[in-house]
Amino acid sequence: MKTIVVKCGGSVLSELSEAFFDSMKELQEQGYAIVFVHGGGPEINSMLEALQVKSEFKNGLRVTSKQVLKTAELALAGSLNRQLVRMLEKHGIRAIGLNSSDNGLLEADFIDQEQLGYVGDVTAVNSPFIQLLCQEQLLPVMTPLAAGPNGTVLNINADHAACAVANALKAEHFLMVTDVDGVLKDGELVPTLTETETKALIDKGIISGGMIPKVQSALKAFSDHVQSVHIVSGKKAFYEHGEWLGTKFIKEKVTI
Ligand SMILES: Nc1ncnc2c1ncn2[C@@H]1O[C@H](COP(=O)(O)OP(=O)(O)O)[C@@H](O)[C@H]1O
Ligand SMILES: CC(=O)N[C@@H](CCC(=O)OP(=O)(O)O)C(=O)O
């Protein structure tokens, strides 16, 4: 099955354009099965603020206490997953919401329980179950939560969760949808990036903040099992007449 894994950032979930859904439908018509993994950082932040619970990030990962985890589950599984499924269905795309910690759809281990609390790295993906839904012409919409050891639930950075799913499914394409056109340098879109160029942009501070886990996940997927990886905007079309827009990750250029 030709599969595309789409990571939809919390930054853009409420701003997804008609053109974005048109691109999605165009790909489905070409016979691609599509799997969504969504984020929700901004929504988790506002819920935590409303509850007057402080949260901090270490190396781009949210330090997750039991209370932060409960709030993250509420925002991700209770609110955003429902909204995204409804948006897809409104656009004529049959979708099914999945809380990825259920039935070990995603399994994870603690990264560093002392420093980060309930935060994990994905160790296993239940690919057959995801593929079963795709065979039924359903688009799975997955939260970035996972089943951890001894019945725990772990909070996973959504870029990392989507990367694990793209690798497990050996997806043909991995798309990271965000609120900017792709990787930008001096305000201009960088159309292609190799691993060396990406690392140089991180070192120079041109790629920073939320873009770091995205490019790291892009490089990891690209070097593992995925054939094509793009960072694109959800505010516009990302696929037109067979062309992908945004930043494309490419193999190192060979100079003789
Ligand atoms: N070089 C860069 N190019 C584009 N965006 C960048 C860059 N460096 C940092 N960013 C920031 O990364 C943000 C996207 O990451 P994030 O807010 O975590 O989005 P998402 O919720 O989609 O994962 C952009 O809105 C921008 O502020
Ligand atoms: C461990 C960790 O940091 N988890 C993230 C999960 C959501 C996410 O990654 O959302 P975006 O894609 O919108 O950033 C968090 O709690 O914010």
Image: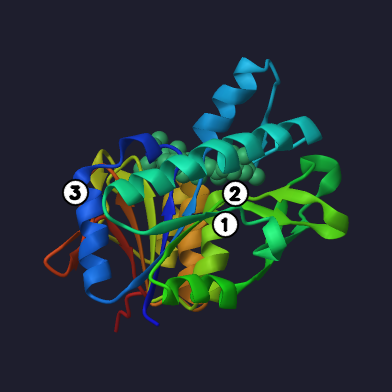
Task: Report helix, strand or loop for mark 2.
Answer: loop
C-alpha gap between disc 3 and disc 2: 27 Å
**Does any atom of ligand 1 lie closer than 8 Å to the CB of label 3?**
no
**Which residue is disc 2 drawn over?**
157
Q: Say whether residue 119 is left or right of residue 84.
A: right
The amino acid pointed to by label 2 is Asn
Measuring 39% from the left and 44% from the top, which residue is drawn there? 86
Crowding near the residue tagged with mark 2, few <14, some 14–19, many ≥20 C-alpha atoms within 10 Å: many
- In which of the image's four quarters is ligand 1 placed? top left
Q: Are marks 1 and 2 in contact (CB under 8 Å)?
A: yes
Does residue 207 appear in this view?
no
On-image quarter of the C terminus: bottom left
- Residue 43: horizontal and vertical position, in percent? 52, 30
C-alpha gap between disc 3 and disc 1: 26 Å
Q: Which mark is residue 19?
A: 3
Image: 119 above or below 104: above
Task: Report helix, strand or loop for mark 3.
Answer: helix
Image: 255 above or below 84: below
Could you say which quadrant of the image residue 204 lies in?
top left
Q: Nearer the viewer, mark 3 or mark 1?
A: 3
Measuring 39% from the left and 77% from the top, which residue is drawn there? 227
- Residue 197: horizontal and vertical position, in percent? 39, 60
On-image quarter of the N terminus: bottom left
Query: Which is nearer the eye, 17 or 238?
Result: 17
The amino acid pointed to by label 3 is Ala
- Residue 33: horizontal and vertical position, in percent? 37, 72
The amino acid pointed to by label 1 is His
**Which residue is disc 1 drawn over?**
160
Measuring 47% from the left and 57% from the top, which residue is drawn there? 96
Query: Which is nearer the eye, 130 or 19?
Result: 130
